[in-house]
Image (cartoon, rainbow, N blue to C red):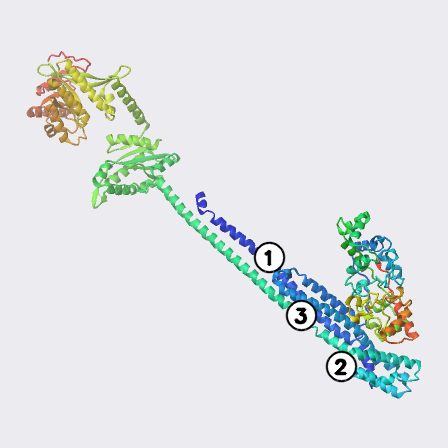
């Protein structure tokens, strides 16, 4: 009797409504001319102090819009202390940066540009350099209709480009739209993904990126005070080791994982995550199937890059 | 009109300016009000959007707390929506006005509340994920795996009991069922000799149990905190503050609007009043102008057109005939009855001359002078015009003007003229008609040569003047012969005028003209001079002609007195021939003067007796010495029995009265003989001698 009751309860709890994940739109609206300028700027080291790094240096399109290195290298080879999150589908994150200190892409874009260990330029220098460049002047004049390039226009162009960085039509999205079937392994992985509670945080359009969560919710996780977590922002004790839940889209492409790059493979990441944040120990089959599911989350290269 | 506008001065313009200004402000404030209304709606719209999003958010939070899969995007999306709407609301331009200070304060409070609310949400989500996962693990995953304790009924039972407590707590959302649950689970942690599977399960089970036990009370608290965050209360307060502020704002605008409206109305009314006043003034001036024009073109007494009007329109007449009517002796009527009666007569005349018979000729009526009425008729045949004039004259003269119960009859002189200049010609003719055509209707024609006559008169007057200055007025003498003896007893001095080219003119040629000029007196004086000179040089007796009226002239009388007194020794040789004058007013004065002259020594003769008004008693009264019978009687007495008898009667009368009689115009012997038979003593005429410069006695024997 009790078992029947519990089963019924769980069924109600977990089968309510739709799937916890929704597909990316197959087409997104953005200003193509501005995005074209943004794309150029994104790859141009002109925005770094010593002209050695560009946005793309740490958000590589060959690695799912992220950095395969544990920490990124800024100007003069300066090391950061956090693993670069992917730029793909960033527009669907509720906040930007690991600790969510930026409310919008616009606020975010300026961050790395000014960061002394990243690109380390101020707005004036950006304007000075770009205005000295006749090709940029011509491009901006054509699109923005002004003879002088302003910093705001630069940010606007980059943001417009980032808005275009959406990776639709992953196998899973197509499954959600009923266009294809998952393999039995992937389907089982998705079932366990939900059953173990991954979907409690990794849900929504970006499969994450819509809440903060403590790293080590059930089993405490090593704390490094040098890393900018949520605590660095709010100074609330309960925010120690709290980070924005990252997106799982294109997760197969963006190793290493976690803010500290402590997981080199997906299997390792799944194991660690279930231990610390789900409070369960997964067996080999669990991990295998969930990783299979995660690999189905890889989408197409954004249209703007093709 | 210009003065009128100037007279109104700056007032209407100032008022107009004020009116336009207030209208402009009115439109401006109206636009402001519309703008405010729009902003007002926009702000309220944002308030409501935030409110409804907030309620959706609350709903989503509730769903999320209940269901594992509820999409957190919806929560964060709603929160983002609230923040964006709040930003729009907070930056609404209308709220930056000073009137909305309270609203801004409330919004600031709301903003801070929203920030803490967002933080609360974020914390809730963090906790919620763990709570949900733990419940899921404890109630469903563990239920699957509990089979690992199949062989240990005690452990199984404990596990089921704990699961039941956890479920109850979850179902009832009541953390109290979890009290002591961890101590209840203590036996599980003390289990020994567990398999690897059993140990793994128990570790996870205890982790989750611990998480639930330590976090669920906090979770319920957080949830109820979120529920009781009452963002909507803050929102409501802010909106209420906004409504209040807006009310003040609208009230202010409405007051301004009202004041401006009143200002506009006042200026409109003022302008209306000023315009009305201008209109009234305008009408008054217009009436005045009409009256003025009327008085210029009309005679106010009779209402007929004035002389001025006649002069203005006379050139526009087509084939006009002017009938000019003059009241005879109107001066006497005025003097006798008073000018009030005169005016009454004139007024009635104005009506009387409007005869229906004239209507066919589109008549126009004028008062052309004091007692002159003019009627202009058009395209009338001369004969017809005469008929019309006759009718008019008869009508007027037969009409009894009743004034103060007295019947007054008047006579009129009428002149008809169809030649330009209409009035001047008619006037000239009227002046002549007064003398000659009193009872007739005079018709002007070019043949009358009235104008030429006038010119002639001027010429004659000039000749007289020149003659006086160059001794051209001379005396010619005609002898008067005694019919018994044939001797010359006297010479009559007759006036002659020598002109510049030495022709000599008789009195008929200039005297009647000279009589109407001041020169006439000088001519008479000259003649008296000539006679006295002749008396000094010769022993003869002389007679000289003086009009009876001339005697009334004091200057002439003085000359006579002086001369007679200075030459008293031959005053007896002078005889003054008085010519009857038709308008002799004061017979007694004349008689007195005659007496005076006789006392100075001269004798008095009555000239041209038998013509005019001559009557015998008149002669007796004048106490004259000699009667000179009118020449026209003498020259016709031989052919005309009446003339003959008249002469004889005069002769007999004179003889009886002891007066001497002289016959004039004697041109034949037969006439002279006839006169002699009648006992007339003396005679003169061509039969004896023509007048001559010399004093020559004729040599005639009967």
| Position in image of residue B238 (x %, y %) | 65, 67
Q: Is residue A108 visible?
A: yes
Image quadrant in which you'd find residue B523 = top left
Whichever of labels 3 and 1 marks the residue nearer the N terminus, that label is 1
CA gap, disc 2 and disc 1: 59 Å
Q: Residue at x 67, y 69 (%)?
A: B235
Q: Is residue B661 left or right of residue B197?
A: left
Chain of the residue that carries numbered disc 2 in the rendered image = B
Q: Quadrant of the N terminus of chain B?
A: top left
Which subunit holds the residue at mark 3?
B
Residue under label 3: B234
Question: Of tags 2 and 1, which is closer to the observer?
Answer: 2
Q: Is label 1 in a helix, a strand or a loop?
A: helix
In the displayed structure, would residue A158 be above or below residue B375?
Answer: below
Q: Which residue is mark 2?
A: B174
Marks 3 and 1 on same chain? yes
């Amino acid at each position: 009797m009790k078992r029947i009751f519990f089963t019924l309860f769980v069924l109600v709890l977990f089968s309510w409504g739709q799937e916890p994940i929704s597909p990316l739109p197959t087409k997104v609206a953005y200003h193509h001319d501005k995005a074209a300028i943004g794309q150029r700027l994104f790859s141009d080291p002109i925005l770094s102090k010593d002209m050695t790094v560009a946005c793309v240096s740490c958000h590589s399109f060959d690695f799912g819009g992220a950095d395969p290195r544990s920490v990124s290298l800024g100007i003069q080879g300066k090391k950061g202390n956090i693993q670069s999150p992917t730029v793909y589908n960033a527009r669907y994150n509720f906040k930007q940066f690991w600790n969510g200190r930026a409310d919008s892409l616009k606020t975010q874009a300026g961050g790395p540009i000014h960061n002394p260990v990243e690109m380390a330029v101020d707005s004036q220098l950006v304007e000075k350099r770009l205005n000295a460049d006749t090709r940029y002047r011509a491009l901006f004049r054509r699109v923005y209709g002004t003879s002088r390039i302003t910093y705001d226009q630069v940010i606007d162009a980059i943001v417009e480009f980032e808005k275009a960085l959406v990776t639709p039509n992953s196998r899973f999205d197509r499954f959600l739209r009923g266009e294809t079937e998952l393999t039995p392994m992937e389907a089982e992985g998705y079932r366990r993904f939900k059953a173990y509670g991954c979907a409690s945080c990794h849900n929504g359009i970006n499969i994450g990126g819509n809440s903060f969560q403590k790293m080590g919710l059930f089993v405490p996780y090593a704390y490094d005070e040098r890393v900018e977590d949520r605590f660095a922002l709010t100074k609330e004790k309960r925010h120690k080791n709290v980070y924005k839940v990252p997106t799982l889209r294109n997760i197969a492409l963006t190793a290493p994982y976690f803010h500290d790059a402590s997981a080199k493979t997906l299997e390792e990441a799944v194991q660690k995550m279930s231990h610390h944040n789900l409070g369960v120990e997964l067996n080999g089959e669990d991990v295998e199937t969930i990783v299979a599911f995660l690999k189905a989350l890889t989408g197409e290269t954004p249209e703007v890059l093709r | 009109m210009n003065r009128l506008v100037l007279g109104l001065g700056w007032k209407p313009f100032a008022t107009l300016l004020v009116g336009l200004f207030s209208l402009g402000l009115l439109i401006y404030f109206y636009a402001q009000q519309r703008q405010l209304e729009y902003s007002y709606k926009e702000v309220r719209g944002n308030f409501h959007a935030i409110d409804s999003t907030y309620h959706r958010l609350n709903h989503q939070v509730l769903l999320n707390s209940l269901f594992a899969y509820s999409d957190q995007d919806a929560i964060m999306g709603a929160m983002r929506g609230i923040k964006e709407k709040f930003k729009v609301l907070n930056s609404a331009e209308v709220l930056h006005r000073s009137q909305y200070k309270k609203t801004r304060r409330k919004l600031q409070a709301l903003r801070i509340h929203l920030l803490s609310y967002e933080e609360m949400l974020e914390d809730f989500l963090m906790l919620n994920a763990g709570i949900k996962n733990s419940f899921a693990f404890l109630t469903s995953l563990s239920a699957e795996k509990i089979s690992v304790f199949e062989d240990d009924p005690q452990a199984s039972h404990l596990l089921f009991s704990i699961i039941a407590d956890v479920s109850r707590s979850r179902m009832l959302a009541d953390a109290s069922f979890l009290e002591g649950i961890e101590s209840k689970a203590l036996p599980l942690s003390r289990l020994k000799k567990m398999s690897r599977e059993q140990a793994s399960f128990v570790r996870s089970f205890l982790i989750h149990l611990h998480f639930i036990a330590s976090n669920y009370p906090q979770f319920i608290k957080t949830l109820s905190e979120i529920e009781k965050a009452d963002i909507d209360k803050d929102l409501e307060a802010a909106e209420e503050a906004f409504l209040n502020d807006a009310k003040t704002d609208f009230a202010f605008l409405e007051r301004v609007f009202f004041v401006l409206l009143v200002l506009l109305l006042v200026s409109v009314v003022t302008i209306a009043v000023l315009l009305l006043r201008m209109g009234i003034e305008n009408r008054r001036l217009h009436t005045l102008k009409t009256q003025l024009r009327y008085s210029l073109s009309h005679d106010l007494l009779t209402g007929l057109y004035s002389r001025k009007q006649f002069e203005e329109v006379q050139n526009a007449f087509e084939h006009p005939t002017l009938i000019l009517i003059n009241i005879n002796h109107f001066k006497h009527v005025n003097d006798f009855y008073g000018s009030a009666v005169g005016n009454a007569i004139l007024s009635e005349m104005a009506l009387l001359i409007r005869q229906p018979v004239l209507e066919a000729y589109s008549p126009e009526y004028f008062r052309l002078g004091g007692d002159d009425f003019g009627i202009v008729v058009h395209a009338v045949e001369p004969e017809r015009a005469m008929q019309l004039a006759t009718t008019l004259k008869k009508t007027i003269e037969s009409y009894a003007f009743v004034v103060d119960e007295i019947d007054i009859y008047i006579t009129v002189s009428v002149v008809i003229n169809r030649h330009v200049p209409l009035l001047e010609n008619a006037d000239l003719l009227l002046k002549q008609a007064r003398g000659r055509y009193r009872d007739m209707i005079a018709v002007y024609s070019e043949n009358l040569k009235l104008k030429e006559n006038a010119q002639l008169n001027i010429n004659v007057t000039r000749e007289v003047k020149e003659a006086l200055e160059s001794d051209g007025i001379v005396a010619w003498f005609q002898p008067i012969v005694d019919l018994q003896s044939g001797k010359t007893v006297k010479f009559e001095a007759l006036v002659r005028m020598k002109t510049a080219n030495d022709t000599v003119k008789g009195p008929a040629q200039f005297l009647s003209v000279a009589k109407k000029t001041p020169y006439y007196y000088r001519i008479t004086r000259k003649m008296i001079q000539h006679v006295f000179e002749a008396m000094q040089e010769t022993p003869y007796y002389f007679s000289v002609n003086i009009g009876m009226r001339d005697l009334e002239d004091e200057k002439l009388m003085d000359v006579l007195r002086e001369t007679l007194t200075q030459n008293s020794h031959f005053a007896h040789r002078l005889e003054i021939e008085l010519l009857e004058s038709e308008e002799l007013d004061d017979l007694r004065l004349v008689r007195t003067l005659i007496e005076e002259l006789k006392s100075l020594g001269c004798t008095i003769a009555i000239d041209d007796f038998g013509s005019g008004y001559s009557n015998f008693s008149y002669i007796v009264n004048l106490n004259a010495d000699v009667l000179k019978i009118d020449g026209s009687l003498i020259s016709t007495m031989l052919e005309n029995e009446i003339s003959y008898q008249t002469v004889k009667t005069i002769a007999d009368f004179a003889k009886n009265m002891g007066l001497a009689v002289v016959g004039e115009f004697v041109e034949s012997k037969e006439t002279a003989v006839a006169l002699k038979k009648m006992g007339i003593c003396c005679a003169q005429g061509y039969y004896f001698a023509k007048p001559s410069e010399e004093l020559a006695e004729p040599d005639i024997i009967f």
